[in-house]
Amino acid sequence: MGTRGNVVMAAIGDTLASIGKALYGAWYTLESWTIIPLAEILMRLWYRLDPRVYSERLRVRSVTAGKADKKSQKYAVLVIYTNSPLASFTANMINAIGRSDINLVVVANGPITPLLRAQLLDACYVLIERSNVGRDFGAYKDAANILMRSEKDVDRLILMNDSMFFFERGLGKLIADLDGEDEFIGLTEVFEYHYHVQSFLLSFGFHAVRSRAFRKFWKSYKPIGTRRWSIHKGEVSLTRHMTKAGFRPHILFQAAQLIPHLRPRPVRDVLESVRLLPSYCRPLLYREFDTFIGAEGFSATDFEAISQGVRPIGPSNRPAGLPGIHGQLETMDRWNFEIFGNRLISLIAKRNQVHVGGFLFMKYLGLPAIKRDIFYRSVYSLEEVYRILSDFNEPLRDEVMADLRRAGTSMHFKGLRRILHSHGSI
């Protein structure tokens, strides 16, 4: 088939792909208007029948003093949900707090073994054991209310949970940053749909904790157990309460901070950075790259394929079939940041930043953590995570991979469960 035939076939393929995307988008929208609201209403009604939603006394089984001495009026609440031995990446955070002047309060969301209980009591100032009512935000509510009642002064309150892989390198600095001067500190933020500071790592200062907005929020918050409730009535609502009260969030890791790290780099390095993004984000950037260099230039998709097996890219080891790659990349530095870098930053900023930009934050900004659901939510494949952590020389790589495999993936979900997952309801 000649060049003209190839062009025609490519056009037909693009048209069919566009039609398929349009049909999928229409069906997805229909689900979001019909099935999802109905399912959410039914789940919320079911949870509201649980009397523990309305009573801290029914939710909290025990509050036990730990063996750690009180070091200050600063407290870090760590919510865990496990009945297994403590994972190394969670122990990393516990140990980092232990080395600081912050008191550790552990909230066990569900039954724990005697061995784990003893391990936690050795490390913490207070251990709160409760039923898993209301997910992590329900645990935050009980811990915050207990501390505000029992402690005369709370100069700093950090809220975190074990939904992150915490890596040892840089963790001490992260704790110090969470104990900064700002009254409202978050690890990352989300602009997608509704702006909010993500709740897996939050920090509140002296004035924020004593504010009417903060106390009113936790007093009125009902620990309903749906994921959407935790996001909209939890993360989004708490962010709005605090910002309306004048507490502007200070975000430790955000897409804009990548600018000075990507600006001086040649375009081939920026292309390598694209490989740290989720696979569903990369084609868009590669298409823009290919459009810029024109049909006669090499494809950025070819660059990724080569990068999988040949590193670093350079004249001494480039494949014989693509002899022009290195030269083309060297002549494109003028376009590096002004266009391609901006596209990359914009893509991260518009989405869930810790999912899309987490590995870039690790590489360039020193983020010592990544979300534990990146495989379950099909953000990354196991092979991609393994490759990236290997490139980073992360000592906990194998333990991370084992944890991702245990959690599984949504790939095999069917029926209503698949629909709920695709819309972020579970």
Image (cartoon, grey):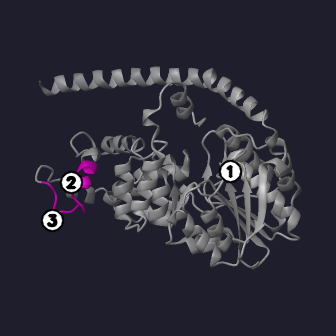
Q: Is residue 259 above or below residue 4?
A: below
Question: Residue 72's x, y, as percent?
Answer: 77, 78
According to the picture, the residue beneath numbered tag 2 turns out to be 325
Residue at 22% over, 55% down? 309
Residue type at tag 1:
Asp
SS assignment at label 1? helix
User: Upstream in the sequence, badge 2 or badge 1?
Assistant: 1
> What span is colored magenta in the figure?
303-319
- Label drawn at residue 192: none
SS assignment at label 3? loop
Question: Residue 236's x, y, as percent?
Answer: 71, 45
From the viewer's perspective, tell me whether residue 280 is left or right of residue 69: left
Residue 27 in the magenta stretch? The answer is no
Q: Which quadrant does the N terminus fall into?
A: top left
Displayed quadrant of residue 47: top right
Calculate the distance from the C-alpha at mark 1 to the C-alpha at mark 3: 52 Å
According to the picture, the residue beneath numbered tag 1 turns out to be 136
Residue at 62% over, 79% down? 99
Number of the front mark, 1 or 3: 1
Q: Which quadrant does the C terminus fall into?
A: top right
